Image (cartoon, rainbow, N blue to C red):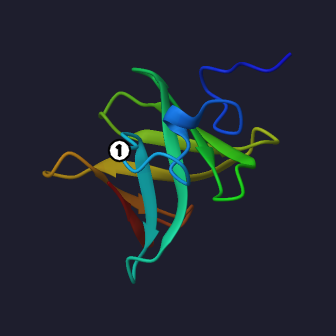
Amino acid sequence: NLNRMINPSLNRNINPNLNYNFSGYFIYDKNLQPLYFGITVNREIIQIFDFNLKNIAFAVLHPQNGFCVFDTNNHYVRHWVEDSQNGFNEFDLHNNWIGVIK
């Protein structure tokens, strides 16, 4: 069963390929190249997709106002730390900075 509220292939409002006023998150590498995008499911969950609209991960809020990111096999793969500009910095499992989320 597909949920139209959080599926960008079924809902153009949350599809950044079709909606220039997309209000979700863009995940960039350190060179500010866009890699993925995120859709806020609720205050505690962000669903992450590639630009081919494939669901690749999800992020869960942690107590320090950042997110733990899990792949679709439920493996912890990285984390986001809140920045001072309404976004996040992304770190790998070894705490190496790998990108930004805005």
Question: Residue 77 or 47: which is nearer the viewer?
Answer: 47
* Quadrant that contains the N terminus: top right
Mark 1 crowd level (few <14, some 14–19, many ≥20, 10 Å Cα): few
Establish if 78 lies above or below 43: below
* Quadrant that contains the C terminus: bottom left
Q: Which structural element holds mark 1?
A: loop
Question: Residue 96 or 80: which is nearer the viewer?
Answer: 80
Q: Name the residue under label 1.
A: 21
Q: Say whether residue 87 is left or right of residue 18.
A: left
The picture quadrant where one finds residue 21 is: top left
- For image coordinates 50% across by 33% down, the residue present is 13
- For image coordinates 39% across by 83% down, the residue present is 31
Please count the marks in the image: 1
Q: Say whether residue 1 is left or right of residue 94.
A: right
Farthest bottom residue in view: 31
- Coordinates of residue 66 in the picture (x, y in percent): 36, 40
Farthest right residue in view: 1
Farthest left residue in view: 84
- For image coordinates 57% across by 36% down, the residue present is 12
Establish if 10 lies above or below 34: above
Q: What residue type is labelled 1?
A: Asn
